[in-house]
Image (tube, grey):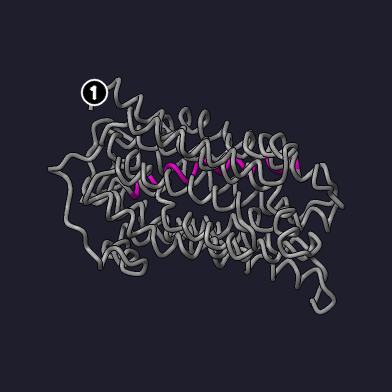
Amino acid sequence: MQTSNKKAAIGFIFVTLLIDCMGWGLIIPVMGELISQLKGIPANEASTYGSYLLTAFAATQFVFSPIIGNLSDRYGRRPVLLSSLLGFGIDYIILAVAPAYGWLFIGRVIAGITGASFTTASAYIADVSTDATSRAKNFGLIGAAFGLGFVLGPALGWLLSTWGVRAPFWGAAVLCLLNCLFGYFVLPESLGKENRRAFDWKRANPFGSMKFLFRHPNIGGLAFSFFLIYLAVQAVQGNWNFFTMYRFGWTPKLIGISLAVVGVLVGGVQAGLTRVVNPKIGNEKSIYLGLSFYTLGLILFALATQSWMMFVFLIPYCLGGIASPALQSVISGHVAPNEQGALQGALTSLMSLTTIIGPLIMSETFAYFSGKKAPFYFPGMHFLLGALFMLLAVLVAGPVLSKDRREHPELIHGGAGDAPVH
């Protein structure tokens, strides 16, 4: 792929991920109200039904992500990516016209099945990245899209909601479908026919795809570290609003402002800092530094006694974002070009698994240690649990990274011109 086409393709991938993140952010402000209307219940009860939708989406994505990833290894990234965008557009249309709560389930299941944008976009990035440094930089775009989408999505959703509770769903559908149409004309295929492979059902089932990760000790250990990181961040993602409301009496407006701050910080770290720090210190040090910041941020959240502290402590926590792109770069460097789709599908399955179990673990920990049955009162205990998972991620990744430093230094230090090791 020519350099100009490569830059244009990476730009399209960034926009695709941004629109995906914006699409979910668009509907966050109104999803609770829509569920309340459809079920005829107050917002506090509606939150339970909202969590069911999240679990349905995550569980479906867990099952289908490796299938989609393997399909992209067989038929190429372009058709799978465009189909995913089309599926998300259909999902939002269903949510927009849903006459009953059950329809929301149908929409979320469709989104989970076709939710290949992350999986296939990650494989696309791996295809067009020529070395470990460029892979880490390009994988950083994923976090940047998340951060920016988390800022723009809720803001646009709030604006569209002035035209009615269902207007943001139509807005999200239009964004997805327009991007699908745009990609049809401008997105080149990144996986040549000579690098494709036959579809393999053993790799395509979610647990079989995890066997793919553990087939190689280096991949298995790093993938488990990847899993622990995303499980740890559920302490924040799955419980931020409940904790801040309970501990500091935050209003929805203040929670929204804090999430916008998170989006700005994450976008700055992934789009800016990662692309500067990683080439200078390499993947290994980026991983250790990022996990240290994550751990520090979680501990500080747990110990916060004033509302303003939560905003300040977001800074070290979000700086931890330099770890994931570096870790993902090392993992992808161990895999052949025709297996990148399978790898990214397996990693997405791991992420989906943390979304299924993580919020339950963290919310139960928060509820228990803020209740009367706890041996001692400590509402921030779930943050400390997240910090523990981060430390475990360091312990798991350490031996593998040390071995890579000796045997595959190009993956660790981000040297130019390295090829995948397999």
Whether the magenta-drawn stretch holds residue 324 is answered as yes
Q: Is residue 273 left or right of residue 64?
A: right
Give the camera-side residue of 406 and 419: 419
Give the camera-side residue of 149 and 280: 149
Q: Quadrant of residue 375?
A: bottom right
Q: Quadrant of residue 23?
A: top right
Q: Position of residue 4 (x, y in %)?
A: 30, 20
User: In the picture, which quadrant includes the N terminus?
Assistant: top left
**10 Å crowding of disc 1: few (<14), some (14-19), many (20+):** few
Q: Position of residue 249 (x, y in %)?
A: 87, 52
Q: Amino acid at mark 1?
A: Gln
The residue positioned 59% from the left and 52% from the top of the image is 95
Inspect this view and state whether residue 326 appears. yes
Q: Is residue 389 left or right of residue 310?
A: left
The image shows residue 421, relative to residue 263, as above or below, that is below
Q: Which residue is mark 1?
A: 2
Looking at the rendered structure, the number of numbered marks drawn on it comes to: 1
Residue sticking out furthest to the bottom = 373
- Which residues fall within the magenta stretch? 311-331
The image shows residue 149, relative to residue 59, as above or below, that is above
Q: Position of residue 337 (x, y in %)?
A: 22, 45
The residue positioned 67% from the left and 39% from the top of the image is 157
The image shows residue 386, relative to residue 374, as above or below, that is above
Question: Which SS type dominates the magenta stretch?
Answer: helix
Residue sticking out furthest to the top = 4
Q: Position of residue 129 (x, y in %)?
A: 30, 34
SS for dot 1? loop
The residue positioned 65% from the left and 49% from the top of the image is 296
Q: Quadrant of residue 52?
A: bottom right
